[in-house]
Amino acid sequence: MKIKPQKIILCVVLTAAVIYFGMIFYSQYRPIKIYVSRIAPMPTELANGLQMEEHKIDPMVKIESPYENASEKILSMEEIRRLRSQIAWSKEISPFYDSLTIQSSERVQIRRMTSRTMYEYQLLKQGDKWVLETATHVMIDRSENNSTAKN
């Protein structure tokens, strides 16, 4: 029995397509950490020990709360699902990220950490689409505890 080359190619292409689309759908629905960010005055307990005026420290700090515990949920879960779908099918951003931080109704930050690098993506909402505004890639040098940033 002789197997035709067309059948082999069809099987290989079909297998590759199933794996590719399976990974896209997995990345779209896998569990990630979702945070809501807000700017607030620094707690007095922390501000008292920092000598704010002498070191010119900004009294406003960024606070990130888990989405489930956030008092103000800026984006609905439906909008977050749409955003995750756009990221999964995008070619600009790796679909396998660790956290999504909602900064405002029109700005989101995505982070991906590996043992040697950190990726940060800033997304901006334009109409119904989320577009990549900036991307930062930071190499982590563990030998000297130094890191260098690349844009």
Image (cartoon, rainbow, N blue to C red):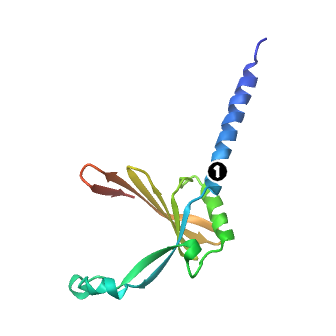
48 lies above or below 11:
below
Amino acid type assigned to the residue bearing label 1 in the image: Tyr
x, y (%) of residue 129?
A: 63, 67
Q: Compared with residue 13, is residue 145 higher up or lower down, i.e. above or below?
A: below
How many C-alpha atoms fall within 10 Å of the one at disc 1: few (<14), some, or many (≥20)? some
Residue 64 horizontal/vertical position (percent):
47, 74
Residue under circle 1?
A: 26
Q: Give the farthest residue toward the top.
A: 1
- The answer, for residue 150, to whether it is visible in the render is yes
Near-viewer residue (135 or 115): 115
Name the residue: 32% across, 82% down. Answer: 46
Please name the residue shown 60% across and 66% down the image: 130
Q: Give the left or right position of residue 108, taking residue 4 as reference.
A: left
Q: Residue at x 75, y 17 (%)?
A: 3
For this orientation, the residue located farthest to the right is: 1
Say what secondary structure mark 1 lies in.
Answer: helix
Residue 65 lies, with reference to residue 97, above or below; the image says below
**In front: 109, or 113?**
113
Question: Left of 37 or right of it: where is 90?
Answer: right
In the displayed structure, 114 sits above or below 83; it is above
Which corner quadrant of the image does residue 68 belong to?
Answer: bottom right
Quadrant including the C terminus = bottom left
The quarter of the picture where residue 131 lies is bottom right
Q: Residue at x 30, y 85 (%)?
A: 47
* One can see residue 128 in this view: no
Query: Total marks drawn?
Result: 1
Answer left or right for 41 relative to 106. left
